[in-house]
Image (cartoon, grey):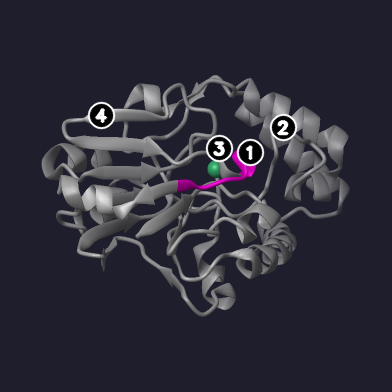
Amino acid sequence: MRVHVASDIHGAATALARAAEGADLFICLGDLILFLDYDDPTAGIYADLFGPAHTVAYIEARTAGRFDDARALSTAAWERKGVTDHQGRWQILESMVRLQYEQMFAAMPSPALLTYGNVDVPALWPEYLRDGHRVLDAQTVGIDGLTFGFVGGGLVSPMRTPYELTEEEYTAKVLALGPVDVLCTHLPPAVPELCYDTVARRFEMGSAATLAYIRQFQPLVHLYGHVHQPQRARARVGRTECINVGHFHGRKHPFALDLSELQRRR
Ligand SMILES: [Mn+2]
């Protein structure tokens, strides 16, 4: 059985529609929304709202780690639009997220197993899921005699993305799994080379709870995304092969997993 796995779709609907070609099953590790495109300041919700020039300044502030400056830029831009309160902002953002989710879930292959990224709004998903789409979070599923475990979402960060959990909340989800053969998450384990983004030049969030889980249960494979340009895309932790499935928005093709090979190694 051949499984295609993709993460960090960030609006790449055309490529997503083809991502399961030749596969028996598709797995999506989250981040469907394109809020900000660091490579293209004309794309994404932020640019749609405030225009490319403002978006360039915002990207520069965030890339330099000046998150307070970035927030001040956003506040000023919202005020120019006449929106001063959180509720007013969210109303506008939600309508734009909904437009993207319509496209993304229309393009999402089926059957698919999905979990959330940090750039997702889980509360909206039930309205957009189609037949054959199954969301798994802190849950396991059996596929061809192998147990797959899923943990979605991100951890609290200075980026303030839409779906961030505390360490305690995230750890509880990881511990709910029990032993699995294939671990699927949005976040990497807290291994520095796997978390460092060589283009953004900063450490993205990795999960210490996931690293502890891997050391304890030693799944065959850990598949994750989140770090778009990682210093290293793979590392071995004991017998577990940790693999970043790649930035789908940039690469436009999925990671392929051959389950018969895993069954032999089991
Ligand atoms: Mn992402």
Counting other residues with Cα less than 10 Å from the Cα at mark 3, is it few (<14), some (14-19), or many (20 or more)?
few
Q: Which residue corresponds to mark 4?
A: 236
Chain-order first, disc 4 or disc 3: 3
For marks 4 and 3, give the one nearer the viewer. 4
For marks 2 and 4, give the one nearer the viewer. 4
For marks 3 and 2, give the one nearer the viewer. 2
Disc 2 to disc 4, C-alpha distance: 30 Å
Whether label 3 touches label 2, CB < 8 Å: no
Whether label 1 touches label 2, CB < 8 Å: yes
Disc 1 to disc 2, C-alpha distance: 9 Å
The disc label shown at residue 135, or none: none
From the top left corner, tell me how far across and down residue 188 is, in percent. 37, 38
Q: Which amino acid does label 2 sit on?
A: Asp
Whether label 2 touches label 4, CB < 8 Å: no
Using the rendered image of the protein, determine whether residue 185 is visible from the camera's viewpoint.
no
Residue range of the region highlighted in magenta in the rendering: 249-255
Farthest residue in the left direction?
Answer: 216
Using the rendered image of the protein, determine whether residue 167 is visible from the camera's viewpoint.
yes
Disc 3 to disc 2, C-alpha distance: 17 Å
Whether label 1 touches label 4, CB < 8 Å: no
Q: Which residue corresponds to mark 2?
A: 39
From the top left corner, tell me how far across and down residue 171 is, in percent. 26, 48
Q: Is residue 185 left or right of residue 201?
A: left
Q: What residue type is labelled 1?
A: Gly
Per the image, label 3 sits on a secondary structure element best described as: loop
What residue appears at the point 39 percent right and 28 percent down from the top-left corner?
Answer: 194
Q: Which amino acid does label 4 sit on?
A: Arg
Which residue occupies the foreground of this view, 95 or 76?
A: 95
